[in-house]
Amino acid sequence: FADRDGYIWLDGQFLPWREARVHCLTHTLHYGMGVFEGLRAYPTERGPAIFRLQEHTRRLLNSAKILGMELGYSAGEINDACVQAVRENNLASAYIRPMSFLGSEGMGLHADALRTHTMVAAWEWGAYLGDESHERGIRVKTASFHRHHVNIAMCRAKANGNYMNSMLAAQEAARAGCDEALLLDVDGFVCEGPGENFFMVRDGVLYTPELTAALEGITRDTILRLAAEEGIEVRERRLTRDEVYIADEAFFTGTAAEVTPIRELDGRTIGTGARGPVTERLQRRYFDVVQGRDPRHTEWLTLC
Ligand code: PMP
């Protein structure tokens, strides 16, 4: 992935993709203290547009604040770098990855006198969980690894080190022949996917876990807003895995995963095993919004 054409924004300037390198003593590589974002730009009638750019940048800056990192860039500068990364790489649609990390000026856990570096890369990335996932849904396995305790890892931060836990869960699910994992919190309640928030539908009511150890997903927020517009009743509360087994519908949300139906959890078919009507309705609204077909939410789009 490092050996390809294109341009990556690193510390204020664009470098050829292959030259955007770091040293092997880069502090974040050793200890995982860093913050990142994942955004998507979608093709619209007026060209590529980044979905909810301001909210993603705000979350990046908030993640840095939580970890006590100084990025040295304003929200406006990060926003510009994201827009430019799409333009410089001539992308009609894109996944955009800003990341801030500590440099290689020294070792040690105090991490004092280290420079903070910031990068933004952008590339084409299709459906995260496979081409058929949006329509057919995916098979999910409850992870044996719990999601972080809120006072062990800072879950409001989209922090690099938090993702070791996500990867353990995702790889465990893949080894069991499933597409994705569902992580429970330390009390055993449903939390989120490795990179997705979770929703389920039962008797026409949409449920999602309240935010404790789960990331404050921007797609989650979008779906909650769209559900309200659709007149769908929403309840945010603790959910148990056996409630999911008997749900009518379930789906994951995330910038990468978008709105992906879940057709099976732990070998139990969810509902009819097909994408359910509420999921389909919200999924259609979501794609209309991100692709600029919904005039009600053009304020969420930043043209590149
Ligand atoms: N939870 C985790 C752990 C994630 O990594 C992500 C992806 N950023 C999400 C939820 C969904 O967040 P968003 O909708 O903002 O992409």
Image (tube, helix red, strand yellow):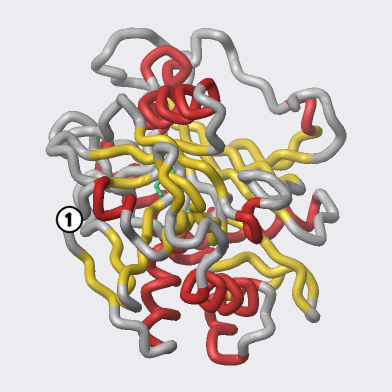
The quadrant of the rendering that contains the N terminus is top right
For image coordinates 45% across by 50% down, the residue present is 269
Between 262 and 106, which is closer to the camera in this rendering?
A: 262
User: Looking at this view, is 22 or 155 the one in front?
Assistant: 155
Q: In the depicted view, which residue is nearer to us: 233 or 75? A: 233
Q: Amino acid at mark 1?
A: Arg
Picture quadrant of residue 162: top left
Q: How many marks?
A: 1
**Image quadrant in which you'd find residue 5:** top right
Is residue 175 shown left or right of residue 95?
Answer: left
Residue under label 1: 238
45 relative to 56 in the view: left or right: right
Residue 115 visible? The answer is no
Q: Residue at (63%, 49%) from the top-left corner? A: 96
Q: Position of residue 134 (x, y in %)?
A: 63, 58
Query: Percent from the top left, x then y, of residue 65?
Result: 28, 45
Find numbered disc 1 in the image and state the secondary structure of the residue it sits on.
loop
Residue occupying the point 44% across, 61% down? 271
Q: Residue 296: horizontal and vertical position, in percent?
A: 54, 90
Q: Is residue 84 above or below residue 150?
A: below
Which quadrant of the figure contains the C terminus? bottom right
Q: Is residue 166 visible?
A: yes
Label 1 crowd bin: few (<14), some (14–19), many (20+), radius 10 Å: some
**Residue 248's image quarter?**
bottom left
What residue is drawn where x is 39% and y is 57%? 217
User: How far across and how far down the image is residue 292, in percent?
Assistant: 67, 80
